[in-house]
Amino acid sequence: MRRPLRLPATPRLPSLRKRLIVQLIALSAGLAVVLYVAVRLGAERASEATLDGLLGAATSTIAEELRSVEGGAELDLSPGTFSMLAAMGEERIFHRIDINGLPVTGYDDLPRPPQEPTALEPVFYDADYRDAELRLVAVARSLMIENRAAPVLVIVGQTRDGQRAVAQALANRAALIGLMVFLIAIPFSLLVARAFLRPVGRLAEAVGRRGGHDLRPVRHPAPAELMPLVEQLNAFIARLRQTLSQTETFIAEAAHHIRTPLATLRSEAEMALRQAGDEPTRARLRGMIRATEESARSANQLLDHATVLFRAEQFTQERVDIGAMIAALADRFRPTADLKDMEIRLDLPSERLETTGDAVLIEAAVRNLIDNAVKYSPEESEVAITLTRDGTFARLTLRDHGRGLGGETLATLSRRFRRGPNVGGVIGSGLGLTIVLETAAAMGGRLELTEHEEGGTCATLWFPLSS
């Protein structure tokens, strides 16, 4: 039995599906982080702009509420002045009013702005005050006191806890949305990877369905990215087909160049045997003839085995009439059987039994079974060949009265160049059953050998019938 060919291990790269899924999930995670950062920064800027607007409005209102009175200035703060700042939450509010550069009300140590504001443009700035980070705005205006223009500076500040709480709330929502997007992206990535790689799987499935004997070009539709692979695969198939054709030609030429010289050598040796007068020369010539026969048989079976191996890879499909082929082969072996006073008895069905396969392989298998039966059977015996229908199979049975299996099994006898222990003195190469078993495997059939108690072997070969 032919041992399966072990190919060298192919280096395996990480799975494209896994790589694609990991990249999609990583991209989703990155987008979620970017979304969180962008929302956080945007929320901080928006809340700061809102706080600046409220602080600016409150400060401008205070500055407008200042009125000059006899001997000084008067400020009448309405309840709504600071209530608008309460919209940012429970914040602490600080204010300071300077007239002529001197504080007159509020917190005297409240930090002044880094630069003096103008009547048209307030100044916004940050400062730490009483263990709190404040956002402050300074507004300048001029007030007439005792008929003289006095510069007035109004500063209002507010803690930023509320602003940060608003920004953090928005950022937390963005983080929740990002997490949801990330979780949704996991099954979505699985679906996308499966859909993205589905054409590759379909192409592999289409090539796999063809089997190892179909050498037609691949015509399965494929995306543009896979077309270079398909083109290279078709080019490889074309080269393989050409190589197999050259192999078949070599086998045919080798058969011709080996068989013809051996046949010529045997004819010359037989003529020399008839003309030789002394017994030592005749003995040597008989040994030469026997060696030539053995060489010819071995060469024929080696070439048959090579043909089986080659054609099994290509497996030409054609309908074969099994009964007609068996009858023709039996007629071919009858002259050999007559030399041993043997009878080849055929029992063929009236119906036509056909199988679909390679006629050369089927002929090689049946020929080797008949050859073994005739070769190992004694003189004046019988070889019975029976063909019957067995369900969806055609069953070919060859029954002889020869030497049997010698205690060996089919698995042992079907090994290449392996012969039984009870066939000494009979010319053979040990390839006959190997050819039969490999043909049965290529055809989808099977071979069975049994040994009868009264002597002889029964070989049964099944071929699948054509539908």
Image (cartoon, rainbow, N blue to C red):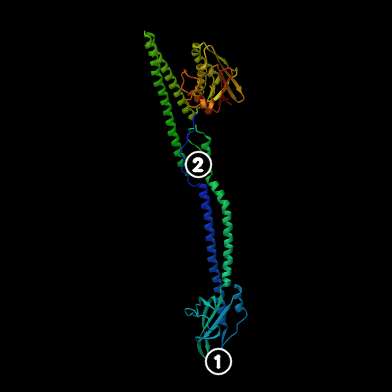
Task: Provide residue 402's location: percent of width, then percent of height.
Answer: 53, 17
Q: Secondary structure at mark 1?
A: loop
Going from the N terminus, do you reach mark 1 or mark 2 first?
A: 1
Front position among marks 1 and 2: 2
Viewer-side residue, 122 vs 14: 14
Q: Residue at x 54, y 61 (%)?
A: 35
Q: Amino acid at mark 2?
A: Ala
Q: Secondary structure at mark 2?
A: loop
Q: Amino acid at mark 1?
A: Gly
Viewer-side residue, 101 vs 151: 101
Q: Residue at x 46, y 20 (%)?
A: 428
CA gap between label 1 and label 2 equals 95 Å
Q: Residues within 10 Å of mark 1 (few under 14, many from 20)?
A: few
Residue 451, compared with residue 22, is above or below; it is above
* Quarter of image, res 70: bottom right
The quadrant of the picture occupied by the C terminus is top right
Task: Provide residue 52's location: percent of width, then percent of height.
Answer: 54, 74
Q: Residues within 10 Å of mark 2 (few under 14, many from 20)?
A: some
Q: Which mark is residue 222?
A: 2
Q: Which residue is mark 1?
A: 71
In-image side of 176 versus 249 (left or right):
right
Viewer-side residue, 275 vs 235: 275
Residue 467, compared with residue 209, is above or below; it is above
Residue 135, compared with residue 416, is above or below; it is below
Task: Provide residue 459's location: percent of width, then percent of height.
Answer: 56, 21
CB contact under 8 Å: marks 1 and 2:
no
- The answer to whether residue 317 of the structure is visible from this angle is no
Residue 435, compared with residue 117, is above or below; it is above
- The answer to whether residue 3 of the structure is visible from this angle is yes
* Quarter of image, res 387: top right
Q: Which mark is residue 242?
A: none
Task: Provide residue 31's location: percent of width, then percent of height.
Answer: 53, 58
